[in-house]
Image (cartoon, rainbow, N blue to C red):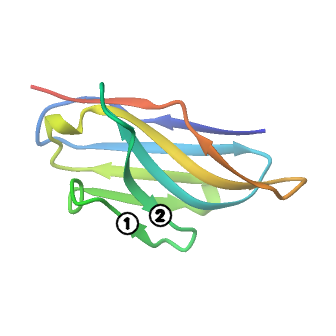
């Protein structure tokens, strides 16, 4: 089986920063695209940042210039560096990945359990 585990969430003041991590474990042959999503109360889940296996990233305008996604393929880990945080960034942040597993080499999409980020003074 495959599991994604996020860490690094918490409470931060406006203008502050946080770094989220998401480690994948299990019978992993290869990880393709990875991404971070977030969901605020009463709102739909939205893409925050995505990164290909080759390291190409994309962001929505709402976080562009403030958030940076990166990955360490040797550690099967994806990161989200968040700067200049705003109250509207408050949400549960979820890790997502397309993973090819042993021994069948099927590709499935996986979600982490989520980590709370609260931006408040």
> For the residue carrying disc 1, how many other residues have a C-alpha within 10 Å: few (<14), some (14-19), or many (20+)?
some
Residue visible at 11% across and 36% down in the picture: 14
- Residue 8 against residue 58 in the figure, above or below: above
Left or right side of 45 for 100: right
Residue 89 image position (x, y, % from top left): 23, 39
SS state under label 2: strand
Residue visible at 84% across and 59% down in the picture: 105
Instruction: Calculate the distance from the C-alpha at mark 2 to the C-alpha at mark 1.
Output: 7 Å
Which is more toward the observer, 53 or 98?
98
> For the residue carrying disc 2, how many other residues have a C-alpha within 10 Å: few (<14), some (14-19), or many (20+)?
many
Q: Which residue is the site of mark 1? A: 58
- Residue 72 against residue 108 in the figure, above or below: below
- Residue 23 against residue 49 in the figure, above or below: above
Q: Which residue is the site of mark 2? A: 51
Which is more toward the observer, 43 or 103?
43
Left or right side of 65 for 28: right
Give residue 31's quadrant in the image. bottom right
Residue visible at 37% across and 66% down in the picture: 58
Looking at the rendering, in which quadrant would you find the C terminus?
Answer: top left
SS state under label 1: strand
Residue 29 image position (x, y, % from top left): 78, 58
- Pointers 2 and 1 in contact (C-beta within 8 Å): yes
Left or right side of 9 for 6: right
Looking at the rendering, in which quadrant would you find the N terminus?
Answer: top right
Residue 110 image position (x, y, % from top left): 63, 44
């Amino acid at each position: 089986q495959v599991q994604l585990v996020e860490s690094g969430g918490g409470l931060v003041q406006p203008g502050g920063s946080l770094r989220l991590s998401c480690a994948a474990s299990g019978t992993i042959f290869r990880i393709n695209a990875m991404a971070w999503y977030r969901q605020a109360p009463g709102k739909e889940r939205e893409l925050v940042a995505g990164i290909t296996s080759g390291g190409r990233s994309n962001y929505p305008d709402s976080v562009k210039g403030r958030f940076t996604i990166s990955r360490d393929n040797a550690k099967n880990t994806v990161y989200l560096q968040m700067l200049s945080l705003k109250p509207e960034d408050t949400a549960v942040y979820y890790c997502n990945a397309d993973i090819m597993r042993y021994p069948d080499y099927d590709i499935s999409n996986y979600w982490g359990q989520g980590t709370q980020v609260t931006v408040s003074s």
